[in-house]
Image: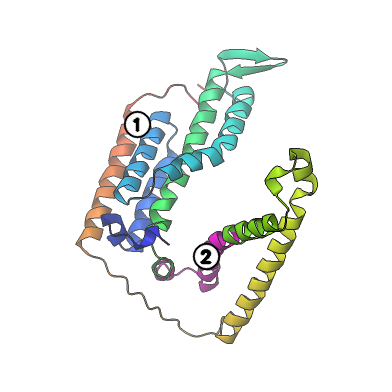
Amino acid sequence: LRHARRTTPIHSLTPLTKILVVLLFWLVSLGQFNPIVLAGLIAVALTLWWVARIPLGGFVRLLAVLSVVIVVLTTINGFMFYNGRTPLFRLGPGTFTVEGFWFGVTISLKILSVVTFIPILTFTTPMPRLMAAMARLHLPYKFIFTFGVAMRFTPLVVQTYRDIVASQRLRGYDLSALPLPQRIIRGYVPIFIPLILTLLRRAADLDIAIESRGFGAPVERTYLEELRFHLLDYLAIGAALIAFVAIVAFGSAIPQFVSFTHG
């Protein structure tokens, strides 16, 4: 929410424009198998982060979260890739191949490029405008409402967890002071039980609130947010389409490091 209130060219775009741009780059990410192109897409996303003044430190945290997935994918594909032909090293009965390594790297870059474009939409768009844009796309209202609640509840869960940890520390229960095995086995019980009870109580309050406001009534809904396209939106869509065609043409012109198909 703090980032959504800033004033940048990307913040000024309508949510429909940002959804279209993100979908175009997702389409490129999912269709490309060239690591160079995928790395270039990540660079494009980070450039848009910089234009939108999204802290680039968030990308470092994103890498830290996905690091385990990247290592697992690269390791599994290195040993089990069906088209692996060039041995890199052997570990017991398994052979780690160059083709498997690059395939794992490519899949990891696909995931990273897709995830890196998400904050360009979510960090620069207030939730009411984003929900109005989803309604313009004729998505089911229950889906839109569930999405909006999930987006609002995620920071609420994090903040509630921090409050409970701080409260328990004031009562002499410091989770960080426990040994790791004890923390894993029973250390989180005094944290998660009040967290779950608090979230259930808030969910019950939300249920009463939406029922009292006629949620699910068969009426035509209206929205406070009016979404209109401006010149900047048309320029952004045109630039995204040009970039889409250029990236696809570039990816087809340059060779890949290895072939991921037979033949």
**Mark 1 or 2: the one toward you:** 2
Determine the residue positioned at 32% across, 74% down: 226
Extreme residue toward the left, this view:
231
Counting other residues with Cα less than 10 Å from the Cα at mark 1, is it few (<14), some (14-19), or many (20 or more)?
few
Element under disc 2: helix
Q: Identity of the amino acid at label 2? A: Arg
Q: Is residue 150 visible?
A: yes
Residue 237 percent across, percent down from the top left: 27, 54
The residues tagged by marks 1 and 2 sit, at their Cα atoms, a distance apart of 41 Å
- For the magenta stretch, what is the residue range? 131-157
Left or right of 148: which side holds 12? Answer: left
Element under disc 1: helix
Query: What is the chief secondary structure element of the magenta stretch?
Result: helix
Residue 252, numbered circle: 1
Residue 190 percent across, percent down from the top left: 75, 57
Residue 36, numbered circle: none
Q: Is residue 27 above or below residue 68?
A: below
Rendering quarter of residue 223: bottom left
Q: Is residue 261 visible?
A: no
Q: Is residue 259 above or below residue 61?
A: above
| Depth order, front residue of 176/112 | 176
Q: Identity of the amino acid at label 1? A: Ser
Residue 220 percent across, percent down from the top left: 45, 83
